[in-house]
Amino acid sequence: MGFANSQNKIIRWVEYRLPVLKWLDAQLIDYPTPKNLNYWWNFGSLAGVMLVVQIVTGIVLAMHYMPHGDYAFDSVEHIMRDVSWGWLLRYLHSNGGSMFFAVVYIHIFRGLYYGSYKAPREILWWFGLIILFLMMMTAFLGYVLPWGQMSFWAATVITSMFSAIPWVGDELVVWLWGGYSVDSPTLTRFYSLHYLFPFLIVGVVFVHLWALHVHGSNSPLGIDIKRPDQDKIPFHPYYTVKDLFGMMVMFFILAVFVFYLPNMLGEVINYEKANPLVTPPHIVPEWYFLPFYAILRAVPDKLGGVIAMGASISIFFVLPWLDVSKVRSAKFRPIYRQFFWIFLGDCIVLGIVGANPPEGTWLLMGRLATAYYFLHLLVIIPLIGKFEKPRPVPEGIGEPVLKDAGAPAKEG
Amino acid sequence: MAESVSSDASTDGAEGETRRDFLYLAAGAMGVAAVAGIAWPLFDQMNPSADVLALASAEIDLSPIELGQRVTAKWRGKPVFIDHRGPEVIEKARDVEVEDLPDPEPDAARVQKPEWLILVGICTHLGCVPFGQKDSDPRGDYGGWFCPCHGSHYDTSGRIRKGPAPRNLEVPEYIFLDDTTIRIG
């Protein structure tokens, strides 16, 4: 298999000088992949597809958008009403952001369930977290651009977090704003950075893939593969086809939102132009920030809340050392598996709390859920790793089946 | 394994091959259609938007323009030259051997009313705006317009007479709404 073995003279001439096809063969065609990957392993490639969708639609939207306080809001309406297909491109971009986060969150929880962050994949995990950080910054910057009420007040609230930093906080915020409040200079620099960051993400994605391809994909069994000849299959056609199928399902879901529910995930009040004199009664971020927003508000101290929110993600950088269990997959970890689902539920509770006003029962729930979030990561996971007795792990992916069937040679 | 492959081939035979080919082609065709379907909006978004198309025509009041005066109006972002021509200027424009011109066209074919010459003020060479709208401008060897970029000379009917421009200055589509108002486009 592979194009690199072509006898075509031009291809051979190029390959001799720059073996690009040989490289593609090794990374995409022949690339040995565990043969038992389930559909949860689709979400990495789906995230890559969504990154491309966001960059392509973003570049064309930038052809019509005006990053200026006086024109931004109107230029978005201009895109919606006057530009050919502008409504489609903008709805693809705004709902595409949500789809991107949904896919990435599933990708991350896949890694948590099957222990994909453990040795030797710690650096792969780190670069994934860096991608998540960059995505969150990009999404926030992009959300400000339509310059509606929610854009403006999201920008105000998020940038004001930096004022919690002792000594230099207030000066720092003025520096971020380019003025004494969020205004046109803020919008213009946010636009510049919103255009830049996706390309930084592309760069980090390549490092992420590089690290992935050193030891190859983890698998639902979470074992080191000792017999690639019987446990691995070439990426093409098996996983190219499987990824393509997943991509079609994802695009189908995205199309349902774009064509039938284009504003379901947004806030109506963002169709009202930014007004620095009136704050909307209920400020909420996009759904993908809600759990972190809940953590921010759970802590009754300005600096403490910001630190807790930052820690809620940063803590994942040391997860490979907090989880001392040598067994990767939750399939063989009866206790961890239950706590995994409790943690997922806790994150969903935080999301629901984040969407509601921080008072009464909601505030209490937010505090309990926040406490559990850190308890899970800092206490429960190390304890399970120490005391849990994992079930026996198979030697290889094909091994149990082949053993049951008798001699490996007899097949079909 | 080898046995089962050969038995598949013997039972399905050539029919199995064509069915697979058909599925490949059908799936590939759907893929091409899907890509084309999304490629078109990405391409078409660069065409003039609805608000630009809505400004495709312009109405101009000619009454303040005095005899002998040249005025520049704007239509679709381009300059439109309006020349209120006097009798001797009209006479000069008519007094040529049409066949000898680089782009033969009689003056009568370029105006609706001889005293009003309406032109798109863009040199047909490479798109500069020729001089000649102000009295103090150089108007070239034929008293019309002179393009400073590459030296094209236009006469009092806006026809190319000398220089690299291939065609006469374009006459836009326009109608007289009344004696002193025109609508261009």
Image: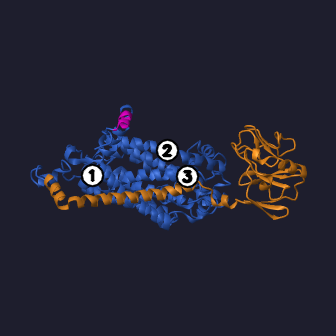
The label shown at residue A329 is 1
Q: What residue type is labelled 2?
A: Phe
Circle nearer the N terminus (1, 3): 3
Q: SS at mark 1?
A: loop
Q: SS at mark 3?
A: helix
Horizontal side of residue A300 vs B143, given as left or right: left
Horizontal side of residue A183 vs A292, given as left or right: right
Is A65 a magenta residue?
no
A231 versus A15 height, above or below:
below
Front position in the image: B183 or A25: B183
- Where is mark 3, residue-wise? A60
State the count of labels. 3
Circle nearer the N terminus (3, 2): 3
Looking at the image, do the residues carrying marks 1 and 3 touch, with CB atoms under 8 Å apart? Answer: no
Circle nearer the N terminus (2, 1): 2
Q: Which amino acid does label 3 sit on?
A: Val
The furthest residue to the top: A17
Q: Magenta span: helix, strand or loop, mainly? A: helix
Palette colour of chain B = orange
Identify the residue shown where x is 71% and y is 39%: B164
Horizontal side of residue A389 vs A59, given as left or right: left
The label shown at residue A199 is 2
Palette colour of chain A = blue
- The magenta segment is A8-15
Q: Distance between the residues labelled 1 and 3?
A: 42 Å
Horizontal side of residue A233 vs A28, given as left or right: left
Say if residue A23 shows up in the picture.
yes
Q: Residue A167: x and y, percent?
A: 59, 42
